[in-house]
Amino acid sequence: MSAALIIHRAGPQVTVQDLGRSGTLGLGLSRGGAMDRLAVYEGAALLGQDPSCAVLEMAGMGVVVEANCDTRIALTGAEITVTLDGTPLRWNACHALAKGARLDIGGFRAGNYGYLHIAGGIQTAPMMGSRSAHLAGGVGACISAGDHLPILADKGGDTGLGLSPSERCSGGTLRVVAGPQTALFQAEMLERFEQTAFARDPRSNRMGVKLTYDGDRFGATDGRSIVSEVVVPGDIQITGDGTPYILTAESQTTGGYPRIGTVLPADMPKAVQTPAGANLRFQFIDLETALKIEARDTAARHALKSQLKRLVRDPHDIRDLLSYQLISGVVSGSEEEPK
C-alpha cells in the first residue's frame, strides 16, 4: 500500500501548492504557488526539509485528514483551530501524526491562508515544473473529500518544535517601490495614497487583493493611453473606477490598468493574510532601501531553522501522562544519609 494522506473533509478552497512555477509567463500563466510564501519556508524549517516541498493551502476553512502511515506534520500561516483525535494542537509547530489518527483543522482565528505540511511533501504529479494548482489558469483543481494524496514514507525527525511567527494577520503598512507608471500619478495623489487607510475587501482571492477606502478616487493622468504590458505579483493596479488591486499569486500576466507602485515581496505575506475589513497603508521607499530589506528578508527565511524552540507541553493535553517518568532524580531533601 502506497503512503497517502486521506481527505475526509475539505473546505471549498483547499489546494496543493508549492513555491510556484517559473518560465511560464510567455504561455500566459503567472507564477502561482502559495499565497503566503513565508509560511512555506516556516513549515520546511519545522520539518527540516526543503521549502520546495508541496503543501496543502487552506483558504477560509480547513480539512479533516488522516494518514495511512506514521508521519510528521507542521502547521503554519493563518492561525486555525486544530485537534488531533480531539486533542488541541499548537499552531506554527510540528507534530507526530500516527497512522489512522484524525487531524481536524477547523475555523480560522486570524489570517486568510493556512498551511498543512507533510514530512517529505505531497507527491502529486508535477505539471510544468510545479505541483501547484493554478485555478485561474486551469491547472489542477481543489482538493475534495475522498481524495488520496500521495506522500513519502517519513524517514523520521524531531517533533514538538515551534516557531514564533512574524505578525502579518492584522493589517499594517506595506512598503512600496515606484514603477514605470508611478510618474503618471500627480504628486499630491501619491501623497494622499500614502495617507489613506485602505480596507481589504472580502471579495479578494488568489488573483488579487481588492481594497476599499473613503475619499476621492485615484487615477493616472494618462491612464487611457497605457498599452497592456507584463504585470507581476505585488503590482498595485488602479482600475477605471479608482479601486486599487494588489496583484497576487494567480494574477493575469499582462494588464492595461496603470500601476501606482509595487509591494515588496517581503511584505506580500502581510498583504495576503490581512483579514477582510482590516486596514492597510502604503509607504513608498527608494530602490536601494528596498534591496536591503529584501536581502535581510531572504537571510531571515534561511535562518528560520536556528529559531526553532522546543514546545512546553501542558500536562492537561498529554494523553499518556502516566507513562512519563516525571519524578526521576527528585528527592524531598529530608532523606537520611545512606549508611
Image: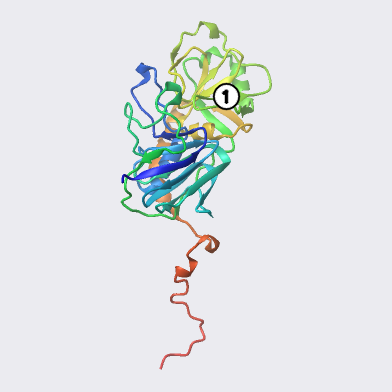
Corner quadrant of residue 37: top left
The answer to whether residue 164 is seen in the rendering is no
* In this picture, residue 196 sits left or right of residue 310: right
The answer to whether residue 126 is seen in the rendering is yes
Q: How many marks?
A: 1
Q: Nearer the viewer, residue 177 or 39?
A: 39
Residue for point 49% across, 31% down: 268
Q: Position of residue 98 (x, y in %)?
A: 41, 54
**Residue 291, relative to residue 184: is it above or below?**
below
- The colour style of the image is rainbow
Question: Where, quadrant-wise, is the C terminus in this rendering?
Answer: bottom left
Q: Position of residue 194 (x, y in %)?
A: 60, 25
Residue extending farthest right? 215
Q: Nearer the viewer, residue 82 or 39?
A: 82
**Residue 187, relative to residue 278: is it above or below?**
above
**Residue 122, relative to residue 23: is it above or below?**
below
Location of mark 1 (residue): 210
Q: Nearer the viewer, residue 90 or 107?
A: 107
